[in-house]
């Protein structure tokens, strides 16, 4: 009988998974280093336009973020279809920008205040009217250094 | 008295733990985009038009609500804008030794006098505005690169990178001064305004 039970010699040995944790840890460390924790939960669509004449903002603590765009689908019912401004984790009106900038300034050390930059993260489909309103508010509180945050790419892609 | 060895810990679930952590980080973090077009807004002064710019020194770019581009009264494609802007900035009809333009008396006197006015309608899309803005800055970059290459044998962009590079060993003050010189040769003067219709 043993003749029939003989093990097939052609069977493949099981692949060792001993190095799998190492591979996964490698990926984990890559993501831990290359990414940052989300600061604000975006409540708006934020598809940034493309540009190639860009400068990098390197001092993260000197940047204030203003987001604008159409409310994302979960917030459509409450916030409407029109483009809105988001400051921190809330929808805001144009008039709230001044208070936001002053609050951000108050939280920073005094000698750093002249170096503060406002990054405008505005969705590509937003109308310029809203952006113009944001800019005039920023001018009034003397927050003159701004950065139109963009993705790196060819500017012609914006028109498609 | 038999001293038993500690049994080997089963490491089979290590991969699962690592996966769990990996997925946590994938979900909670973002790769932050922190680069863009840096600009300086004009200070808020309510003065009457006391700065007078001659019409020939003004390069008018307008974008209407349909995202169409009009340059100096003519409809234009975005791809042509850079070339036309370079021709305007580099015209050099008066007091400009380094300009290589056509020295047309109907166009700008010199890069210092030349001002680009970018007007956008309330309904213009932000993407179009950024695209146009990008092309105008590209025109300045081309000219600055050309002059930097001629004077210092290095492009303007490369010099700016040197300035930011931590491992750059040569004198940074020198680089900063050169950048300032090139900037003063082609100062970036782009006015942003809203189109009133």
Image (spheres, coloured by chain):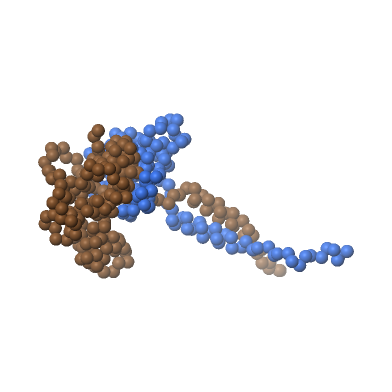
Residue B134 x, y percent position in the rendering? 30, 50
**A20 to the left or right of B161:** right
The residue lying toward the viewer, choosing from B49 and A18, is: B49
- Count of numbered tags: 0
Residue at position x 32%, y 66% in the image: B167
Q: Nearer the viewer, residue A3 or A156?
A: A156
* Residue B87 placement, left or right of A69: left
Q: Position of residue A43 (x, y in %)?
A: 42, 38
Name the residue rendered at 29%, 34% in the picture. Answer: A95
Left or right? Give the position of A20 relative to B185: right
Quarter containing the C terminus of chain A: top left
Q: Residue at x 28, y 53 (%)?
A: B138
Which residue is most to the right? A1
- Along the viewing direction, whichever of B60 and B159 lies nearer the viewer: B60
Is residue B25 shown to the viewer in this render?
yes
Residue A118 visible at all:
no
Q: Quadrant of the N terminus of chain A?
A: bottom right
**Viewer-proximal residue among A151 and B173:** A151
The colour one sees for chain A in the rendered image is blue
Direction from residue B112 to residue A60 in the image, left or right: right
Chain the render paints brown: B
Q: Position of residue B175 (x, y in %)?
A: 23, 64
Where is residue A71 shown, x and y percent of the image? Answer: 41, 36
Residue at (38% x, 33% y) in the render: A82
């Amino acid at each position: 009988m043993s003749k029939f039970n003989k093990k097939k010699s052609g069977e493949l040995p099981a692949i060792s998974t001993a190095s799998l944790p190492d591979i996964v840890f490698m990926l984990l460390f890559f993501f831990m280093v290359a990414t940052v924790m989300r600061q604000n939960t975006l409540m708006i669509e934020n598809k940034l336009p493309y540009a190639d004449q860009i400068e990098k903002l390197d001092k993260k603590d000197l940047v204030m973020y203003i987001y604008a765009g159409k409310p994302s689908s979960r917030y459509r019912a409450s916030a409407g279809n029109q483009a809105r401004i988001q400051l921190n984790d809330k929808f805001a009106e144009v008039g709230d920008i001044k208070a936001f900038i002053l609050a951000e300034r108050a939280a920073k050390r005094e000698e750093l205040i002249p170096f503060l930059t406002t990054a405008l993260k505005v969705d590509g489909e937003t109308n310029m009217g809203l952006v113009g309103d944001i800019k005039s508010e920023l001018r009034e509180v003397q927050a003159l250094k701004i950065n139109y945050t963009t993705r790196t790419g060819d500017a012609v892609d914006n028109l498609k | 008295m038999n001293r038993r060895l500690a049994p080997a810990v089963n490491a089979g679930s290590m991969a699962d733990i690592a996966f769990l952590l990996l997925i946590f980080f994938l979900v909670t973090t973002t790769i932050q985009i922190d680069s863009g077009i840096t600009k300086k807004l004009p200070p808020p002064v309510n003065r009457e038009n006391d700065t007078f710019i001659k019409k020939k020194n003004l390069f008018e770019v307008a974008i209407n609500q349909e995202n169409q581009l009009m340059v100096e009264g003519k409809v234009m494609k975005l791809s042509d804008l850079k070339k036309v802007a370079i021709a305007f900035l580099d015209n050099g009809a008066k007091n400009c030794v380094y300009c290589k333009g056509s020295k047309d008396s109907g166009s700008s006197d010199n890069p210092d006098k030349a001002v680009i006015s970018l007007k956008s309608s309330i309904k213009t899309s932000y993407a179009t505005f950024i695209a146009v803005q990008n092309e105008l800055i590209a025109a300045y970059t081309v000219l600055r690169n050309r002059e930097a290459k001629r004077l210092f044998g290095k492009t303007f962009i490369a010099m700016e990178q040197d300035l930011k590079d931590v491992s750059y060993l040569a004198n940074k003050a020198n680089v900063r001064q050169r950048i300032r010189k090139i900037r003063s040769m082609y100062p970036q003067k782009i006015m942003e305004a809203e189109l009133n219709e």
